[in-house]
Image (tube, coloured by chain):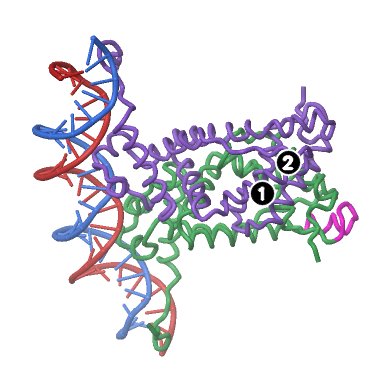
Chain colours: A green, B purple, C blue, D red
Amino acid sequence: MIEDTSGPGTVRPGGRTARVREAVLRAAGDALVERGFGGVDLAEVARRAGVGKTTVYRRWGTVPGLVADMLAEMAESSQPRADTGSFAADLAALAALIRETLTDERQGPLFKAVIATATGDAGTAAALHRFYRTRIEEWSPCVDRAVDRGEVPEGTDAAEVIRFLSAPLYYRLLASGDPLDAGTAQRAAAATAAAAREGVFVTAR
Amino acid sequence: MIEDTSGPGTVRPGGRTARVREAVLRAAGDALVERGFGGVDLAEVARRAGVGKTTVYRRWGTVPGLVADMLAEMAESSQPRADTGSFAADLAALAALIRETLTDERQGPLFKAVIATATGDAGTAAALHRFYRTRIEEWSPCVDRAVDRGEVPEGTDAAEVIRFLSAPLYYRLLASGDPLDAGTAQRAAAATAAAAREGVFVTAR
DNA sequence: ATCATAACGGGACTCCAGTTGCGTTAACGG
DNA sequence: CCGTTAACGCAACTGGAGTCCCGTTATGAT
């Protein structure tokens, strides 16, 4: 199975192909929000995107394939990062941002559907993990600055702090079903800050 | 659409019906573990359970319907609760137990699949939320005892403590994909204990 | 401007998940 | 033990998701 990369075997990501991808990903997102993973069929996505269904089946093949491509797209658009000058306030801002995202009328159901898809497909799972890795890296500087300011101990694992902050919100969204109110976000920030100050997230070295 | 509950309209949960339910739920669990939600069709479940597929379609109708019934079953079998005499140790024991469950070869994939199913079906979601409510209530006494011993402040919300303890483990299982190692469970316990001691989970009253 | 071909689109076709109709089994009340 | 009927099982049916074939469009290189 050796691929011939010589000759005029070019790829064509421009013009029409890009437009088709954009339209299909948008339609797929709409379908996921409305029906969730499981209620999406590619034929309908194709119709709503104004695209031949053969195209969708050929390029993406399955719903998980489509979702994986969506996640690659989502990982590129970056979020604004807070910089208040205080560790606790930075964490509170991030917790509030995550809460707003997960309670958003569109984003909430979309994240649910995407995560559900990832539970059953290795490729989608890999794309999802890449997405969270980039998001976590974007916010890590908040923790690193807090270390520099002496608010939390040297050696604190920034990524682990962000994960612990996010976790309670995702837990409610996906598992317990308890309301995602502002108090929960505040508690998540306060709990993470308290634990970080005590050195719970210091990496053994 | 008024149902006639009078007359000899009896329900028959005994004998054969119970055996069929047991066989079908087990087969459904196996299918969920192997293929995940999305890769399960009721016809195959019926075959593996040694049961007519009409029966499965009539009693449960859809995969989410089946999963909701599984969750009702799961909510009944209770877990052993630790009682070490120390708040930190109790939390560590619970964190370790959750970690073992989620990394178990069968339970891990099963929980993933069940949660994925719940994201797309209100009935399954309700059953899932009931499941977690009962589990959280089972472990709440650990926190209440800690309050009695004066290890954490009066007014600490036991359910919220348990949720915060569980969350990091579920977050890794479902979202970030980072390894669910023993250290993570320990950090979850330590972080929750630290936050609880500082009164983060004290309910405003 | 021209050409080779990557990528798209329409429509017929297939296959099987889910439905329906009806006969059979066995649970439960008497 | 017997009768009623809830619940099950078999087999035929159907609708639409996913596949295939082949013609069309338009991209990118020259």
Question: Which amino acid type is marked by label 2?
Answer: Asp
For label 1, the crowd category at 10 Å Cα-Cα, with few meaning under 14, some 14 to 19 and many 20 or more, is many
Q: Badge 1 is on which residue?
A: B96
- Front residue (pair B178, A96): B178
Q: Position of residue B182 (x, y in %)?
A: 68, 56
Instruction: Look at the image and tell me in which quarter the C terminus of chain A lies.
Output: bottom right
Question: Viewed as shown, does residue B143 lie left or right of C23?
Answer: right
Q: Residue at x 50, y 44 (%)?
A: B115
Q: Badge 2 is on which residue?
A: B90
Q: Residue at x 34, y 33 (%)?
A: B18
Query: Residue B121: which quarter of the image?
Result: top left
For label 2, the crowd category at 10 Å Cα-Cα, with few meaning under 14, some 14 to 19 and many 20 or more, is many
Q: As displayed, is residue A64 above or below residue A182? A: below
- Front residue (pair B72, A147): B72
Q: Position of residue B82 (x, y in %)?
A: 68, 39
Question: Which residues are the magenta region?
Answer: A141-154
Q: Is residue B10 magenta?
A: no
Q: Position of residue B116 (x, y in %)?
A: 48, 46
Q: As displayed, is residue B68 above or below residue A119? A: above
Q: Main secondary structure of the magenta part?
A: helix
Question: Viewed as shown, does residue B12 lie left or right of A38?
Answer: left
Query: Residue A12: which quarter of the image?
Result: bottom left
SS assignment at label 1: helix
Q: Is residue A149 magenta?
A: yes
